[in-house]
């Protein structure tokens, strides 16, 4: 095949695939929608196959489109690695790191580290995405992410896992709630009360649903919020319902919010977070430095085993 591939076409297809939208893909590639559409059509004609299914709800990749995007991501990633290797010789050439993380890592651990990293790496951009743990691993496998933070500790072909942090979930209730009298409780004891839950996109949401189903019970939703631990705490303090969030977040918000923190006795309430990267492809120097900083920053967080959980903080 004598087809010549254009890097802009590759980036466009990757952006369209990520957004599942030609319009948003065009915006991310800094192209007008007509120009983007013409590029995709030209690419399809050159390859002799359709890359996108087009419908009223947006676009999806055809099987050949999935293959094209997979290889396009590999090519673009290799170019990022090339830029990273020669940065010290070519000032002004920017590198890019794609970091995908689950809800807890995104809210609790990543912001502080990322702030320090960006200050010392002004020539590097970071693409930060929140995903469920299994989606984080898939993104690393597919090459959509360079670094992942996940509650998953195995799985995914060619993925290497590094221990990161321990994450313990805790129950938060308002002062005077029947469960506030104890320092700990089993999750089953909470199922008679209304819950303030994180959104469906949160791994914690899925974890609580499964735990309730395993007990033959149904989780009683009163309010479903975005993935914001502070909102959960404020609604709990307002006596709207109870919630389950990371203990580290609960202790932080308990300083200013009248809530009580109760340890969960269930084994699943403790989760081990891992960093994950592709094993076969070494990261460029600037991306490896972010991994090293994340590892160095990792330290035991306050949880219900080391802090007075029955107190407001």
Image (spheres, rainbow, N blue to C red):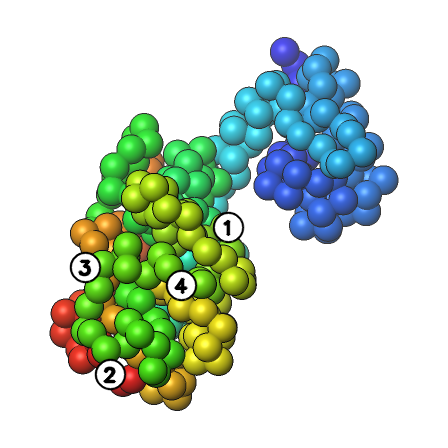
Task: State the residue in front, 296 or 19.
Answer: 19
- CA–CA distance in space, label 4 to label 2: 20 Å
Which quadrant would residue 191 be assigned to in this image? Answer: bottom left
Image position of 250 (left or right of 234): left
Tell me the tag on residue 193.
4
| Front: mark 1 or 2 | 2
- CA–CA distance in space, label 3 to label 1: 24 Å
Residue at x 85%, y 40% (from the top left corner): 34
Image position of 95 (left or right of 117): right
Instruction: Assess disc 1: are there few (<14), some (14-19) or many (≥20) residues with their C-alpha within 10 Å of its C-alpha.
Output: some
Helix, strand or loop at disc 4? loop
Helix, strand or loop at disc 3? loop
Helix, strand or loop at disc 2? loop
Image position of 22 (left or right of 107): right
Tell me the tag on residue 200.
1
Which quadrant would residue 255 be assigned to in this image? Answer: bottom left
Dot 1 or dot 2, earlier in sequence? 1
Image position of 58 (left or right of 80): right
- The residue tagged 2 is 311
Q: Position of residue 139 (x, y in %)?
A: 44, 39
Dot 4 or dot 2, earlier in sequence? 4
Q: Residue furthest left?
A: 306
- The residue tagged 3 is 265
Q: Are marks 4 and 2 in contact (CB under 8 Å)?
A: no
- CA–CA distance in space, label 1 to label 2: 29 Å
């Amino acid at each position: 095949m004598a087809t010549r591939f254009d890097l802009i076409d590759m980036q466009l297809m990757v952006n369209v695939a990520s957004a599942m939208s030609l319009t948003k893909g065009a915006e991310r590639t800094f192209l007008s929608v007509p120009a983007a559409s013409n590029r995709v059509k030209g690419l399809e004609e050159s390859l002799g196959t359709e890359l996108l299914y087009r419908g009223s709800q947006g676009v999806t990749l055809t099987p050949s489109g999935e293959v094209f995007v997979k290889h396009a991501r590999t090519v673009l990633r290799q170019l990022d690695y090339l830029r990273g290797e020669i940065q010290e010789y070519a000032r002004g050439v920017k590198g890019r790191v794609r970091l995908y993380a689950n809800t807890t890592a995104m809210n609790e651990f990543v912001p502080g580290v990322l702030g320090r990293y960006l200050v010392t790496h002004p020539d590097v951009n970071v693409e930060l995405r929140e995903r469920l743990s299994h989606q984080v691993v898939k993104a690393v496998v597919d090459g959509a992410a360079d670094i992942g933070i996940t509650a998953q500790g195995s799985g995914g072909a060619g993925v290497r896992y590094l221990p990161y942090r321990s994450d313990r979930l805790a129950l938060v209730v308002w002062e005077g709630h029947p469960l506030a009298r104890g320092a700990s409780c089993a999750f089953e004891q909470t199922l008679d009360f209304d819950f303030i839950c994180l959104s469906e996109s949160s791994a914690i949401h899925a974890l609580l649903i499964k735990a309730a189903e395993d007990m033959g019970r149904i989780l009683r939703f009163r309010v479903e919020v975005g993935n914001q631990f502070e909102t959960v705490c404020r609604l709990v303090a307002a006596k709207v319902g109870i919630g389950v969030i990371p203990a580290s977040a609960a202790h932080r918000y308990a300083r200013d919010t009248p809530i009580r923190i109760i340890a969960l006795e269930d084994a699943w309430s403790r989760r081990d977070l891992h960093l994950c990267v592709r094993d076969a492809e070494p990261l460029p120097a600037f991306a490896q430095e972010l991994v090293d900083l994340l590892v160095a920053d990792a330290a035991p967080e306050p949880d219900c085993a080391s802090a007075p959980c029955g107190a407001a903080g």
